């Protein structure tokens, strides 16, 4: 019978190692180590310390920044996980110089980087510029909605929150009465019973304090929107995974190597409100690299239909950006998608084999089948009935229409009902005459911004340019969310969430430097 040397995986051993040799050239930890040591100005942290003569020595900001960036790159979002890695993982030990910062120190350092984070982010961008990783010709913008460290159960208008507080108070009285009954029956209240009373009291105090210290939040229409007791700067957002309480993390990306030029988190779900601050933040970052104020002139800019807004089109026009932002109806005008929804109306069914030879349904009347009567500004239908003007300027999705409508008694016994009305149950015919179409000039004889954008998006060149957006911006969010496991923010308030999001943007850029940059151009670190 053969003999083998014994082994035991559970045994402990002491191995002499050199921390410096664990940081191998060509790895992400080496890139982080080199850039933090040589290219990032961590001296901006020194003014926060006041322990020159008294007090305990502090952890060096370089050490904390290195382990945080490495932790985020390994999917360690929690500060406790990073603390554990600094005690057990050799690479983390090497970057930390065998120091072991606790989780509270790590969390406090991240939360307090309000003024320093943008300078560190720009230092990384400067390295990307030195390595010629920025193309500077095509930029793309998009957002990622992520949950925050806040419960959506604590959201509501002030009226709803007061109602919630009243319910908790009622529940607390019931629990206290039950407590008193136990006293009368000489039963000692159980520990869970006392904890339940304490929890209810804490929730009531929390709601009462929030209602006293805050004012109702007003939306764009000045109507009150929901507040959140846990994090009032976050918002409820609809995603493909359901409704979340969180932030809308935005990123503006250069197309050459998908370098993030600016990142910011917003407490609103509407992307079109975020274009202006994202462009302004990108301009400031590029200006710190020595770029001119008119750097965006004639540059290509792409964003999806969520950013389509007249205000945003005007901003792009002012910045002289060659923007491609589709309107919500652009796919309906694209012949490639002409039949994509033909079976989704709930009425049209997929044809069976025996039905394919049936004659097609009758064609409906179009606007061209109605005759305009200029004398009284009305239309006549094919049955010679009058459609009167109802609304002079009716806005639907950035298009202005004149709205005409027939009389119910004229349509009730009309022989053309099947060809004229949308459904059998429809009572009157509505005629919408567009005043402004794509390609049509306005009153001044000049194409409006919305019309110009529609013409650009519908052109073959515009379709080709806009199609590049998907491959430019979406892999960035896939890398951060899937590969880096950043599926929720662990901090509260916009300032702290911004810091965490920009740290992840920095990690993304550091990986691009590792994979596409030439470290020789900025002097490889040698011992």
Image (cartoon, rainbow, N blue to C red):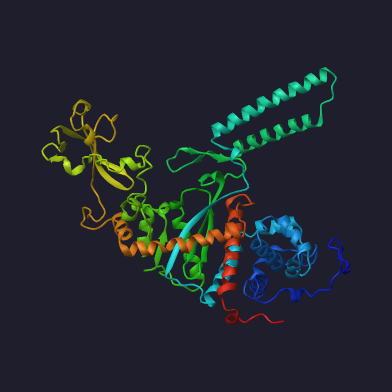
Taking the spot 38% from the left edge, 37% from the top edge, the residue there is 346
| Left or right: 508 as drawn, with respect to 331 | right
Q: Where, quadrant-wise, is the C terminus in this rendering?
A: bottom right
Q: Position of residue 338 (x, y in %)?
A: 32, 51
Q: Note whether 84 is above or below 238 in the view shown.
A: below
Q: Note whether 278 is above or below 400 in the view shown.
A: below
Question: In this orientation, which residue lies closer to the viewer: 48 or 28?
Answer: 28
Question: In this orientation, which residue lies closer to the viewer: 374 or 71?
Answer: 71
Q: Position of residue 207 (x, y in %)?
A: 63, 35
Q: Position of residue 409 (x, y in %)?
A: 20, 25
Q: Can residue 328 be seen in this view?
A: yes
Taking the spot 69% from the left edge, 63% from the top edge, the residue there is 48
Taking the spot 48% from the left edge, 59% from the top edge, the residue there is 278
Q: Is residue 233 visible?
A: no
Q: Which residue lies most toward the left here?
A: 375
Q: In which quarter of the image is residue 91?
A: bottom right
Taking the spot 22% from the left edge, 36% from the top edge, the residue there is 419
- Count of marks overlaid on the render: 0
| Left or right: 70 as drawn, with respect to 13 | left
Q: Which residue lies most toward the top here?
A: 184
Question: In this orientation, which residue lies closer to the viewer: 252 or 339?
Answer: 339
Q: Note whether 125 is above or below 416 in the view shown.
A: below
Q: Where, quadrant-wise, is the N terminus in this rendering?
A: bottom right
């Amino acid at each position: 019978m053969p003999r083998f040397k014994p082994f035991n995986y559970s045994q402990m051993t002491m191995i002499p190692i050199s921390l410096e040799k664990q940081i191998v050239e060509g790895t992400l930890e080496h890139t982080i180590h080199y850039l933090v040591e040589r290219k990032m100005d961590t001296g901006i942290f020194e003014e926060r310390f006041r322990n020159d003569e008294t007090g305990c020595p502090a952890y060096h900001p370089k050490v904390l920044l290195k382990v945080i960036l490495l932790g985020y790159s390994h999917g360690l979002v929690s500060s406790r996980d990073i603390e554990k890695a600094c005690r057990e993982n050799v690479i983390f030990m090497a970057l930390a110089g065998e120091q072991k910062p606790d989780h509270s120190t790590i969390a406090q350092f991240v939360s307090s980087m309000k003024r320093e984070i943008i300078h560190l982010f720009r230092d990384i961008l400067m390295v990307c510029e030195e390595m010629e990783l920025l193309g500077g010709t095509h930029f793309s913008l998009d957002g990622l909605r992520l949950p925050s460290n806040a419960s959506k159960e604590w959201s509501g208008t002030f009226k709803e929150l007061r109602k919630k507080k009243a319910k908790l108070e009622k529940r607390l009285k019931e629990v206290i009465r039950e407590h008193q009954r136990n006293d009368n029956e000489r039963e000692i209240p159980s520990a869970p019973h006392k904890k339940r009373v304490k929890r209810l009291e804490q929730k009531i105090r929390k709601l009462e304090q929030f209602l006293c210290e805050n004012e109702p939040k007003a939306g764009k229409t000045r109507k009150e929107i929901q507040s959140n007791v846990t994090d009032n700067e976050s918002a409820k957002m609809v995603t493909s995974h359901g409704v979340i309480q969180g932030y809308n993390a935005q990123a503006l990306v250069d197309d050459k190597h998908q370098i993030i030029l600016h990142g910011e988190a917003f407490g609103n779900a509407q992307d079109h409100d975020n274009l202006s601050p994202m462009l302004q933040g990108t301009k400031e970052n590029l200006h710190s690299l020595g770029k001119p104020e008119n750097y965006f002139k004639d540059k290509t800019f792409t964003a999806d239909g969520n950013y389509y807004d007249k205000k945003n089109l005007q901003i792009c026009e002012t910045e002289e950006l060659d923007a491609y932002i589709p309107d919500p109806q652009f796919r309906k005008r694209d012949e490639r998608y002409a039949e994509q929804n033909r079976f989704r109306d709930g009425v049209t069914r997929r044809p069976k084999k025996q039905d394919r030879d049936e004659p097609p349904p009758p064609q409906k009347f179009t606007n061209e089948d109605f005759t305009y009567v200029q004398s009284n500004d009305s239309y006549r239908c094919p049955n010679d009935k009058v459609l009167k003007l109802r609304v002079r300027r009716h806005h639907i999705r950035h298009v202005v229409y004149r709205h005409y409508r027939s009389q119910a008694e004229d349509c009730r016994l009309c022989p053309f009902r099947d060809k004229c009305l949308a459904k059998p149950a429809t009572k009157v015919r509505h005629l919408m005459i567009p005043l402004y179409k794509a390609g049509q000039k306005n009153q001044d004889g000049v194409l409006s911004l919305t019309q110009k954008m529609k013409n650009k998006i519908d052109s073959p060149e515009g379709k080709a340019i806009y199609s590049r957006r998907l491959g430019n911006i979406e892999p960035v969010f896939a890398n951060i969310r899937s590969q880096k496991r950043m599926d929720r923010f662990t901090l509260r308030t916009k300032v702290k969430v911004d810091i965490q999001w920009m740290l992840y943007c920095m990690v993304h850029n550091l990986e691009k430097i590792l994979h596409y940059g030439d470290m020789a151009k900025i002097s490889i670190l040698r011992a």
